[in-house]
Amino acid sequence: MKDCFYQYRKGLYTVLSTLTYEGNAIPVMEYVQAEEETPYIQILNMNSGLERDDDVFMQAVTTDIMVVTSHPGDPGQFGSKKSDDIMNLIMEKLITKGVTVSDRAAHITMDDFTDNGCEFAGLNYQSEFDGKKTTIRKILTIQTMIDENV
């Protein structure tokens, strides 16, 4: 059995790097410095567990993807629409539905593994106001079943 994390993260990076907001590319990172300019997308934590299958090594993988936006001033009445818009782009790109495995796995490609399509697992909203700037963090949790190609 092989570890799929690197290849899956790389596949996510490739897909998410195609996203733009207001005509500008949205940086996608694994590691972010404290003073990084916003907006950006960060691929965060990953967890996996073995799914029992006698024919293939299969992992149930959970991944957190964070969007960070900020703007000067107080949060306003409803936070940041920018974070909503960017998260919508991510969700529309990654979370799939379809009848067949190929319908659901159209986006993430890996050399040694097959992605069986992402499903929505949760969304978290965090806001922070430091007296001068509002920062919004939205964390999407997705789940996928990944088969090792043998």
Image (cartoon, rainbow, N blue to C red):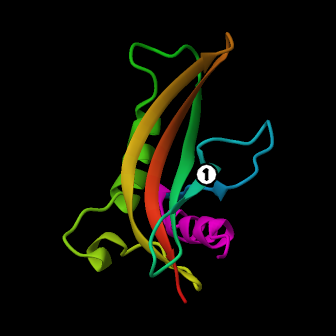
Q: Is residue 74 visible?
A: yes
Magenta residue span: 1-21
**Viewer-side residue, 60 vs 17:** 60
Residue at figure coordinates x 80%, y 43% from the top left: 33
Residue 33 lies left or right of residue 8; in this view the side is right
Helix, strand or loop at label 1? It is strand
110, above or below 49, in the image: below
Residue 99 lies left or right of residue 81; in this view the side is left
- Residue 13 magenta-highlighted: yes
**Viewer-side residue, 63 vs 81:** 63
Residue 124 drawn at (x, y percent) = 48, 31
Residue occupying the far bottom of the picture: 150
Quadrant location, the N terminus = bottom right
Q: Amino acid at mark 1?
A: Asn
Residue 73 drawn at (x, y percent) = 58, 16
**Viewer-side residue, 88 vs 26:** 88
Q: Residues within 10 Å of mark 1 (few under 14, many from 20)?
A: few
**Viewer-side residue, 137 vs 133:** 137
